[in-house]
Image: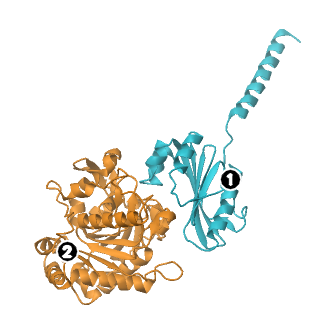
Amino acid sequence: MKNRREFLKNAATGALMLGSQGKFGLASVLGQHAKADPSRLVVASDPALHAKDGRPDEQRVLDLLDRAMTAYTGRDHAVEAWKRIIPRDKVIGLKVNTVGLKPIATHLVLVLAIAERLQQAGVRAGNILVWERTAEELEAGGFTINTNPARIRCYGSDVAGFEDQVETWGVARVQLSKILTRECALVLNLPVLKDHADAGVTFAMKNMYGVIKMVDLKSLHTNICNPGIADVNCIPAIRDKVRLTIGDAISALYDGGPLFHPEHMWHPNALMVGADRVALDQAAWNMIERKRAEVGLPTLEAKGRAPRYIATAADARHQVGCNDLQRCGLMEV
Amino acid sequence: MNYSRRWMLAAVAVAIVALAAGSGCKKSKVNPFPASGAVAGWEKTGDTRVFAAKDLWQYIDGDAEQYISAGVISTSTSDYKYQGQLEAVVDVHTMGSPDGARKILETGTSDAKAASLGDAGVAYEQSVIFRKGPYLVRIVAYESTPGTPQALMALAHGVEAKL
């Protein structure tokens, strides 16, 4: 793990670059990060995040988000951190994950905290678009559908539709959601940390299955979703527009996922922030394995569903990110 | 009675017998979901949704494969609420045979407690799973409260009685 001074030095460099260059202000950030510390990630946690009623405390979630974002960007103040990385006059998509029922969906309280900070950073409410595959899934996750452009919008790709054109990369043959291609200037990826029956682990990269319509469902799910997930993450619109992941590890599943299995849920009480989806997924896999070992479950490798798509995404052909956490700027705050 | 009339009566008799036999063989359409108030404290808060095996991924994406390989025919689901507060969901998987239901139930973890439901069942703090014939029922509460296990068991018995 890098020390705070070293991490912040790189983070500040990246943030400055983000603010000063690029089509959307943010646009060049990741490119500049590549020169600085492209795979750095922050894991922020708060053991007291859950209140006595068993739900995450709103204020503590906001504080945790602030801590994660200031650490990630190297800024002293949360709103300043957001201003550095977000274009104010464009539509920002918040791609949540609500597959698996409300208790294991992206927490509404986290989405509201992000929306609050975005607005304080100058983004109009109507330019914030919370989305998932379908309106039904959003509602099942506890979100309220809204298409009124005067307020924070929330709807599914079933409402917006999909592009007619089929995008191809490796085994991936998909149609992209128009929310991704036409509505959003950039997308914040808000996945949930979960074990996954088909993929081994679902987190930053797997959440991109929710921005597409699969022309060939099977090819993306065979062989523990390898190379399906890696291939989908190479599609240019996904690579370019999905800039930052704020992973919801407030509650997580260490087995039985992606559906809600309360008997396999635990509360890491953490947020995982980074631009490198591969690094985030590697860290997520490690967390799940640690928890499985703690409760006496066999490894995902032993269960025959190690998420090999992570290494595939890091290989020379895909280059989605870095799966060597020794080389990443991993910072725990 | 002339010849043609005798034939007509015979045909009617055969049709009646065939109709009776047919309806006797046909599986009655099961509605396993207790109506609001049928189980004390429980209210059915949503419409019943039904997914055929080929569409199951739309409901349990990422988990559908294990049900398909166990021979699921369809899955029905509905939301419930207990005393206006505790949310829960009831899933009823109709498998091709009791073996399919057994296969899914056996994947449970060792920390489950045996529950006296249907042909076999298990209970956790926030969920109950049981099988009865070709049906595999899973009831999950969204929150854990002191009264959750007891409330779930009551609802599970309500579902069991309708299968």
Q: Position of residue B137 (x, y in %)?
A: 59, 53
The colour with which the image depicts chain A is orange
List the single residue furthest toward the top: B3
Q: Which residue is mark 2?
A: A329
Specify the amino acid type for callout 1.
Glu
Residue at point 16%, 69% (across, down): A327
Q: Position of residue B8 (x, y in %)?
A: 79, 17
Vertical position of residue A230 compared to residue B135: above or below: below
Q: CA distance from mark 2 to mark 1?
A: 54 Å
Chain bearing tag 1 is B
User: For numbered disc 2, what is the local secondary structure?
Assistant: loop
Residue B160, numbered circle: 1
Q: Position of residue A25 (x, y in %)?
A: 18, 77
Q: Is residue A152 visible?
A: yes
Specify the amino acid type for callout 2.
Gly
Q: How is the image coloured?
A: by chain
In front of the other: A26 or B143: B143
In front of the other: B10 or B52: B52
Residue at point 53%, 49% (across, down): B106
Residue at point 40%, 79% (across, down): A112
Vertical position of residue A273 compared to residue A167: above or below: below
The image quadrant that residue A150 belongs to is bottom left
Chain bearing tag 2 is A
Chain in cyan in the render = B
Quarter in which the N terminus of chain A is drawn = bottom left
